Amino acid sequence: MVKAKLIIGMVLAAATLPAAAASFDASIGEEAVRVGVVGDLGSVFSGAKGKYDLGALWRSEDGADAFVPHVGILLTGDAGARDAQVTAGLGVRLAYIDGENKEGGAVALGGQVDVRIPGYERIALGAYAYGAPEVTSFGDADSYYDIGVSVGYEVIKDASVYIGWRQVEADVDGGGDIEADDGFHAGLRLNF
């Protein structure tokens, strides 16, 4: 029931954001699915720079279910590469982790990078990483990390497909971990 309320709350929050440039992302792996919305932070907080990031990942596998929603902010810009279009960002993410009869949260620091090579701008290489040590984790979570890489192709101007790999995991009290995802996935990104 808590999961359903969180999902409904995230969808309603995303729906109430002002109309502005945003990107919807959905990806499916063998055992997990992730959806998210990324948009201009200035559309939410007047004059703010950067991007907001709302998303959730669900895993369902033989009794090892996991649910990891997150909200974050990211300051992005040109990384200054001479011959390639490289956009990078640094930010913070608040994640809730629920799985295997444990739940907790984490405040994770991290970033991302997107690379476009001249002459091949429709092909995107991307990577991201967020991590939280024990000191910024709470509840049953002792640490948390979410890392991933992808390669995508812009089919039309505002729609891309991609394949990638990600690992989302939290160490928990008493030993063990909650592995929300660890594998390959295929995704779709739509820009509005």
Image: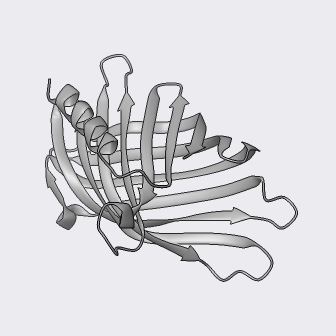
Residue 85: give x, y in percent of width and height.
72, 71
Q: Residue furthest front?
A: 19
Which residue is the extreme one toward the left?
A: 139
Say if 31 sits above or below 77 in the image: above
Tell me if residue 82 comes above or below residue 131 in the rendering: below
The residue closer to the viewer here, 129 or 85, is 85
In this rendering, position of residue 16 left or right of residue 42: left
Q: Position of residue 174 (x, y in %)?
A: 15, 44
Which quarter shows the N terminus? top left
Residue 7 sits in quarter:
top left
Residue 151: x and y in percent read: 69, 49
Where 173 falls versus 110 (above or below)? Answer: above
Q: Quadrant of residue 13?
A: top left
| Scheme of image coloration | one colour
In the image shown, does 139 or 177 lie closer to the viewer?
Answer: 139
Location of residue 144 (image quadrant): bottom left
Nearest to the observer: residue 182 or residue 149: 149
**Is any part of residue 99 visible from this angle?**
no
Answer above or below: position of 91 versus 100. below
Identify the residue at horizontal 61%, vertical 70% (top origin): 87
Left/right placement of residue 179 relative to residue 105 reads right
Q: For the point 35% across and 52% down, which residue is it?
A: 18
Farthest residue, direction right: 119
Residue 106 shows up from this direction: yes
Left or right: 139 as drawn, with respect to 65: left
Q: What residue is rendered at 54% in x and 47% in y?
A: 192
